[in-house]
């Protein structure tokens, strides 16, 4: 009994070797900066011993969110993982410069709303004044309603044939 408890405790505490499948599951977050993602990806690569250099490079490119860095890496493939990291550093610097420029410029001002004018040659639609009192129907509609009423009156006195005997 004691031996099985001891075995269960230590078997759950054993660190298992991480495989390249962990790299395949990684994705860059929507608001995660390129620098933070590459650092997180690189740390995971150090823990995975079974993956090759090509796997590291290919999975990094695949896991990046759509943007200029991913587009550049997809257009001209890198020869090694070190080259992918070198090219990513350029886009990291670009991304950080854009953040700094945005801070210097201040918050974006909303554009003033333009009044919508109707196209030339057409006057704007005017709504008709509402009628007060009872609702009037057109003579055409009155004719249809009276025909419907006559048809209903004809069938009121007749028994319904539901089943054949």
Image (cartoon, helix red, strand yellow):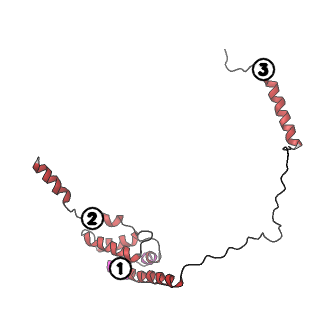
Tally the marks: 3
Q: Residue furthest front?
A: 133
Q: Residue 56's spot in the image, x, y percent? A: 32, 72
Residue toward you, 118 or 130:
130
Spatial CA span between label 2 and label 3: 83 Å
Residue at the spot of label 3: 158
Side of 112 where 70 appears, left or right: left
Taking the magenta stretch, the answer to whether it contains residue 73 is yes
Graded by Cα atoms within 10 Å as few (under 14), some (14 to 19) or many (20 or more), the crowding at tag 3 reads few
Residue at the spot of label 2: 19
Q: Residue at x 84, y 55 (%)?
A: 129
Q: Residue 24's spot in the image, x, y percent? A: 35, 65
Q: Residue 33's spot in the image, x, y percent? A: 41, 75
Q: Residue at x 39, y 67 (%)?
A: 27
**Which element type, helix, strand or loop, lies under badge 3?**
loop
Against 62, is 11 above or below? Answer: above
**Which element type, helix, strand or loop, lies under badge 1?**
helix
- Which mark sits nearer the N-terminus, 1 or 2? 2
**Which element type, helix, strand or loop, lies under badge 2?**
loop
Q: Residue 15's spot in the image, x, y percent? A: 21, 63
Q: Residue furthest top?
A: 165
Magenta: main secondary structure equals helix
Side of 77 where 103 appears, left or right: right
> Residue 160 shows which numbered tag?
none
Residue toward you, 117 or 70:
117
Q: Which quadrant of the rendered structure holds the C terminus?
A: top right
Residue at the spot of label 1: 85
Q: Which residues are magenta?
A: 71-86
């Amino acid at each position: 009994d004691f031996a099985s408890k001891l075995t269960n405790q230590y078997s759950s505490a054993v660190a298992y070797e991480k495989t390249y499948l962990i790299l395949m599951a990684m994705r860059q977050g929507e608001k995660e900066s390129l620098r933070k993602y590459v650092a997180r990806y690189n740390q995971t690569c150090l823990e995975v011993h079974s993956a090759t250099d090509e796997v590291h490079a290919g999975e990094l490119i695949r896991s990046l969110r759509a943007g200029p860095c991913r587009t550049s890496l997809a257009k001209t493939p890198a020869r090694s993982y070190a080259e992918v990291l070198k090219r990513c550093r350029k886009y990291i610097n670009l991304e950080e410069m854009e953040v700094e420029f945005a801070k210097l410029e201040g918050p974006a001002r909303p554009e003033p709303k333009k009044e919508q004018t109707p196209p030339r040659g057409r006057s704007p639609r005017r709504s008709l004044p509402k009628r007060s009192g009872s609702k009037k129907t057109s003579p055409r509609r009155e004719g249809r309603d009276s025909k419907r009423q006559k048809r209903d009156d004809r069938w009121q006195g007749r028994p319904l044939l539901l089943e054949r005997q």
